[in-house]
Image: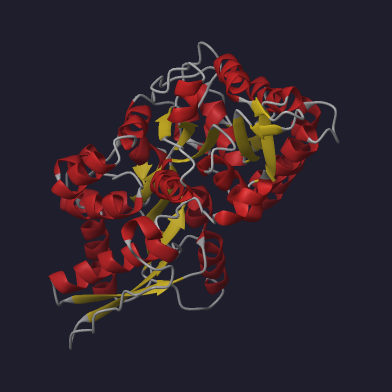
């Protein structure tokens, strides 16, 4: 069964083949016009998405000659923010930097950023009203928009509609409870004549991001007080009954033989999960909506009859919450000449326009951050090609505003995720007897790390 998975290598954002690009950049920068002000821009997207970022930069540089954006690719999001923090000690900072969602508090704590809210207010612009509310909400701390949303995503439940139809299940059902997913997974599981599972109902990795989302569907906080939205977070409280319910659900599918865990998210484990889904060896999985195009293309290439569908992420019956956005935003640093500062803001405004957001979304799979982007022809064409994306849009817009769905903001998010994923693995593999015990340990360690970080500020 697992031998088939070597046929495909998929990343969460693998849409290169679907778009006709190579994984190495073929997008050459435009030459700098004489007399223009150079603005340095660091970004952490690679592969096809990195190429689309370069295209956005080229569009900006071709649109005017006063400023020139020099786009400098970094290996990934982690490397970007780590390089920036290292540069704070005396290196040269970029004028604009793309930073992932969970780096928000760390960016604020640098003391070297200009909140975009200040620039918007200064020019009396009407940008915020057109931003997707859930997206704007994430990057708003204590009522202030700190960075400009650029590429946003959210999690969904992927399902093989062909397998669902075969099992007599509704492939168009949008909201599934944990119990309903378990029932469906049982019906979808297939075994050979020797009793070996040849198709699991659901396959998943142990991913903290999905656990965070499951807390938000149940309006449960990740950090106290108030997810760090009004004052600095002091304690991590993800070891709640809501998180226990999620881990217990995952383990129940594995124990019953309907679910397959591929281990901690990332690298080969994520590749194996994705390959199992697109080859029909798992009828459901959980991932970002940004994976949709890669899944569709890879399923077509595998030619195993997988028909990719999308639903809201599952939740307990009666859950009243919604999802938290993922992705990244553009931050303006308080460095450089006045001309560079002006150029940085000019580029950030350009990148946030409905036209550019429609271009970026239609060529990657991220949400447009601007609602007006859906009226742009690029986005209309993308939705016609990928109607499954509408389900994710509806999921985002059905999310009620709350501290839980805004997501947590604190300075040690990367470490906390690693601790959670380790706890998940220990529980799923039976090394720790209960989900509560595993999460309690992770929360205790993570809270201590947060306390050490906060003591530095």
- Quarter of the image that includes the N terminus: top right
Question: Foreground: 313 or 347?
Answer: 313
Give the image quarter of residue 27.
bottom left
Q: Residue at x 69, y 37 (%)?
A: 261
Colour scheme shown:
secondary structure
Left of 403 or right of it: where is 335? left
Left of 30 or right of it: where is 44? right
Residue 116's spot in the image, x, y percent? 31, 53
Q: Is residue 282 visible?
A: yes
Residue 43 drawn above or below residue 134: below
Residue that protrudes farthest toward the front in the picture: 193
Question: Foreground: 179 or 355?
Answer: 179
Q: Residue at x 86, y 36 (%)?
A: 431
The total number of labels drawn is: 0
Residue 84 drawn above or below residue 189: below
Residue 75's spot in the image, x, y percent? 52, 68
Left of 73 or right of it: where is 255? right
Residue 87's spot in the image, x, y percent? 53, 73
Residue 92 drawn above or below residue 194: below
Q: Is residue 139 visible?
A: no
Question: Foreground: 57 or 235?
Answer: 57
Residue that protrudes farthest toward the bottom in the picture: 34
Residue 317's spot in the image, x, y percent? 53, 12
Give the image quarter of residue 22.
bottom left
Residue 150 drawn above or below residue 397: below
Q: Residue at x 52, y 54 (%)?
A: 10
Give the image quarter of residue 26.
bottom left
């Amino acid at each position: 069964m697992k031998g088939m998975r070597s046929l495909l290598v998929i990343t969460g954002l693998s849409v290169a083949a679907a778009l006709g690009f190579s994984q190495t950049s073929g997008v050459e920068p435009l030459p700098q016009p004489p007399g223009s002000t150079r603005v340095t821009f660091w970004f952490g997207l690679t592969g096809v998405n990195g190429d689309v970022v370069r295209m956005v930069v080229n569009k900006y540089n071709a649109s005017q000659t006063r400023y020139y954006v020099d786009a400098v690719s970094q290996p990934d999001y982690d490397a970007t923010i780590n390089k920036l923090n290292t540069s704070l000690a005396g290196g040269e900072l970029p004028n604009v930097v793309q930073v992932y969602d969970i780096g928000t508090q760390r960016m604020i704590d640098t003391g070297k950023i200009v909140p975009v809210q200040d620039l918007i207010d200064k020019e009396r612009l009407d940008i915020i009203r057109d931003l997707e509310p859930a997206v704007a909400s994430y990057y708003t701390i204590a009522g202030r928009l700190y960075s400009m949303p650029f590429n946003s995503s959210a999690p969904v439940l992927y399902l093989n509609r062909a397998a669902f139809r075969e099992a007599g299940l509704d492939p168009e059902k949008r909201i599934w409870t944990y119990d309903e997913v378990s029932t469906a997974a049982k019906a979808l599981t297939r075994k050979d004549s020797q009793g070996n599972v040849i198709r699991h109902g659901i396959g998943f990795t142990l991913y903290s991001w999905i656990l965070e989302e499951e807390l938000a569907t149940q309006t449960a906080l990740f950090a106290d007080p108030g997810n760090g939205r009004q004052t600095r977070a002091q304690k991590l409280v993800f070891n709640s009954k809501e998180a226990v319910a999620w881990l217990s659900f995952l383990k129940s599918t594995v124990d019953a033989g309907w679910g397959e865990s591929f281990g901690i998210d990332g690298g080969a484990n994520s590749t194996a999960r994705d390959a199992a889904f697109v080859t029909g060896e798992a009828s459901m999985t959980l991932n970002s909506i940004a994976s949709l195009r890669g899944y569709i293309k890879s399923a077509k290439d595998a030619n195993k009859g997988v028909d990719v569908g999308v639903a809201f992420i599952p939740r307990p019956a009666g859950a009243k919450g919604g999802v938290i956005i993922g992705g990244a935003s553009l931050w303006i640093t308080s460095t450089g000449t006045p001309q560079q500062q002006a150029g940085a803001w000019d580029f950030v405004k350009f990148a946030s326009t409905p036209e550019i957001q429609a271009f970026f979304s239609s060529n990657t799979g991220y949400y447009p951050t601007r609602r007006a982007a859906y009226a742009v022809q690029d986005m209309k064409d993308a939705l016609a090609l990928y109607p499954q994306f509408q389900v994710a849009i509806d999921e985002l817009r059905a999310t009620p505003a709350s501290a839980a769905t805004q997501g947590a903001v604190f300075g040690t998010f990367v470490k906390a995720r690693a601790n959670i994923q380790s706890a998940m693995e220990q529980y799923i593999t039976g090394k720790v007897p209960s989900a509560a015990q595993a999460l309690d340990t992770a929360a205790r360690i993570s809270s201590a790390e947060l306390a050490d970080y906060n003591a530095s500020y």
